[in-house]
Amino acid sequence: MNFETISFQQTDKIGIIKINRPEAKNALNEQLFRELNQLLDSIKENDNIRVLILTGGEKVFAAGADIKHMASLYPMEAEEFITLINSASDKIAGLNKPTIAAIAGYCLGGGLELALACDILIASQGSKMGQPEINVGIIPGGGGTQRLIRLIGSGWGKRLIMTGEIIDANHALQLGLITEITEPDLLMSRAKELAVNLQNKSSVALRAAKRCIEHGQNVELASGLEFEQKMWALLFSTNDQKEGMEAFIQKRRPQFIGK
Ligand code: CO8
C-alpha cells in the first residue's frame, strides 16, 4: 500500500505508523484519515503485526486537525469529516493488539485525540500537549471530551478543554496523560522496547484485557466485573494459559503462541 500522508514500516512483529505532513506540522486532513482507516483495516487482519506504534516522528506528533481544510466546511461536510476521524480513532482504540503513541513536539487537538485512542502514551522531553480547539471556536470532536476525561478526570480535563491551555510533558506525566518521558533521541527506541515486551506476551490474553477494559468503560461496575470474570475463565481454554502456568512451575520462560 502506498500512502502520501502517512508511512508504514514493520520490523519483526511491530508495526509503526508515522504521520507524514511535516509542511503542516502533521495537521490531520481528510486524505490522511482515509489512508489511516485503510491501513488500520489491514493491520487488524494481519496476525504478523502484534503491536502497533503511532508516531509523528522526531519533531511533531500532530498539531491537530487541519484548520485550513475545516475552515470552509458546511455542517454536513463537517459531519462527514468527523465521522471519518472517529472511525480511525475507534479503530485504534478497538484494535485487537496493543498500541503505543510515541509523542514528540506538539500533540494538539485531533493529534492528542488520536494519541488518546492508543493504549500507552509516552512522550519525549519538551513535547507539548493540549486541546486548543476552543481557540478556533469549536470543541474536541475526536473523543477528547470523553477519552481525556476518562483518563485524567474532569478537573484537569475540563481545564484543558475549556482554556485550550497547552501543557508540557512533565505536567502531562503528573496528570497521568502520558506514562513516561524519554530523552528526545530515545523516544522511538523506548517505544520499540515497550513493543517488544508486549510482543512477547500472550496475544489472546492481551486482547482479552483490552476488551475488558474497553467494555468496562461503558457499563456499570457489576457488568464490567461479570464480563471480566467470563473473559478470565475463557482464557483457560487457551494454549497460552497452559503454557504460561507450566512455564512458571518449570521455572522457564513461556513460549506463547497466541492461541
Ligand atoms: N491545521 C492546518 N495547518 C496547520 C495546523 C493545523 N492544525 N497547525 C500548523 N499548521 C501549519 C501552519 O499554518 C503553517 O503553515 P504555513 O507555513 O503555510 O503558514 C505550518 O503548519 C507551520 O506552523 P506554524 O508556523 O504555526 O508553526 P509554529 O511552530 O510557529 O507553531 C503551533 C506551531 C503552535 C502548533 C501552531 O501551528 C498552532 O497553534 N497550530 C494550530 C493548533 C490547533 O489549534 N490545533 C487544534 C486544531 S482543531 C482540531 O484539532 C479539531 C479536532 C477535531 C477532531 C479530530 C480528531 C482526530
Image (cartoon, grey):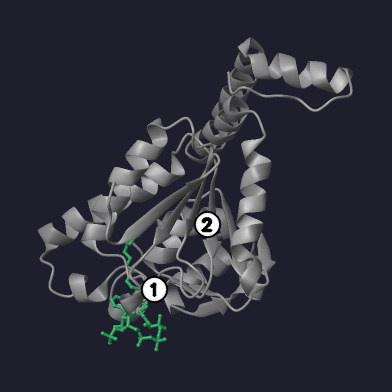
Q: Residue at x 55, y 36 (%)?
A: 210
Is label 1 within 8 A of ligand 1 (CB to nearest ligand atom)? Answer: yes
**Residue name at image x 81 percent, y 20 percent:** 247
Marks 2 and 1, how far apart in space? 15 Å
Q: In the image, which disc is placed on residue 63?
A: 1
Q: Observer-nearest residue: 96 or 80?
A: 96
The disc label shown at residue 223, or none: none
**Residue under the point 33% across and 38% down:** 41
User: Residue at the spot x=75%, y=21% of the render?
Assistant: 244
Amino acid marked by disc 2: Ala
Of labels 2 and 1, earlier in sequence is: 1
Q: Position of residue 165 (x, y in %)?
A: 49, 80
Instruction: From the viewer's side, name the closer residue of 244 and 57.
Output: 57
Quarter of the image where the C terminus is located: top right
Classify the position of ligand 1 by quadrant: top left, top right, bottom left or bottom right.
bottom left
Q: What element carries label 2?
A: strand
The kind of secondary structure element at disc 1 is: loop
Image location (x, y in percent) of residue 213: 56, 37
Q: In this view, does 251 lie to the left or right of 7?
A: right
**Disc 1 residue type (three-letter):** Ala
- Pointer 2: residues within 10 angstroms few (<14), some, or many (20+)? many
Q: How crowded is mark 1: few (under 14 residues within 10 Å), some or many (20 or more)?
A: many
Identify the image quadrant of residue 133: bottom left
Q: Where is residue 98 in the image (x, y as percent from the top left)?
A: 55, 41
